Amino acid sequence: MFNIDFPFHFDHRGKTAVADDDEHIRDLIEQFLFTNPGERVNRPEFGSGLLQLIFAPNSPELAAALQFTVQAGLQQWLADVIEVQELEVTSDDARLRVDLKYKVRRTQELTAATFTRSTVS
């Protein structure tokens, strides 16, 4: 089975780039985390909305609410692929960081990944 790499691009042969299963799962998580609800026409409820909160004032309450909603979304959209073990979302100035530990359901392998976005290039 071939998994199209995210973001979509062509490989060195000029063909659609593909990803192995582990990379594909990471790509799926990244797509969920950094997509805003309403951004996808056929799935308007898909996405975490994290990017909307980069400049929101930090507080323990916001962090707790954010972690709760992100974990719920991951369970809703990717529960057949992963099981969330740990999740931490932090925001510093214009940088957003998500630390995630999850178990791949197919292999039962534990994986840790960090996802970051910054509004400054």
Image: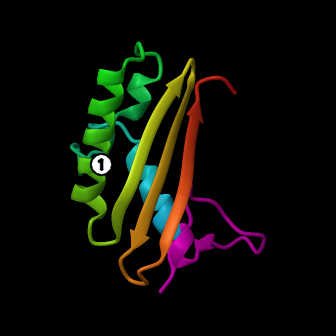
Q: Residue 88 at x, y = what percent?
A: 43, 42
Residue that appears at 31% across and 43% down:
70
Q: Is residue 118 above or below residue 12?
A: above
Tell me if residue 22 is in the magenta stretch.
Answer: yes
Q: In the image, is 11 to the left or to the right of 67?
A: right
Question: Which residue is denoted by mark 1 in the rendering?
Answer: 71
The region drawn magenta spans 1-23
Q: Residue 1 at x, y = what percent?
A: 47, 87
Residue that appears at 57% across and 35% down:
117
Occupied quadrant, residue 89? top left
Residue that appears at 40% across and 53% down:
86
Q: In the image, is 104 to the left or to the right of 20?
A: left
Q: Residue 39 at x, y = what percent?
A: 33, 39
Tell me if residue 78 is in the magenta stretch.
Answer: no
The quarter of the image holding the C terminus is top right
Occupied quadrant, residue 6? bottom right
Give, as a three-letter code, the residue at label 1: Gln
Residue 34 visible in the displayed image? no
Q: Is residue 15 above or below residue 84?
A: below
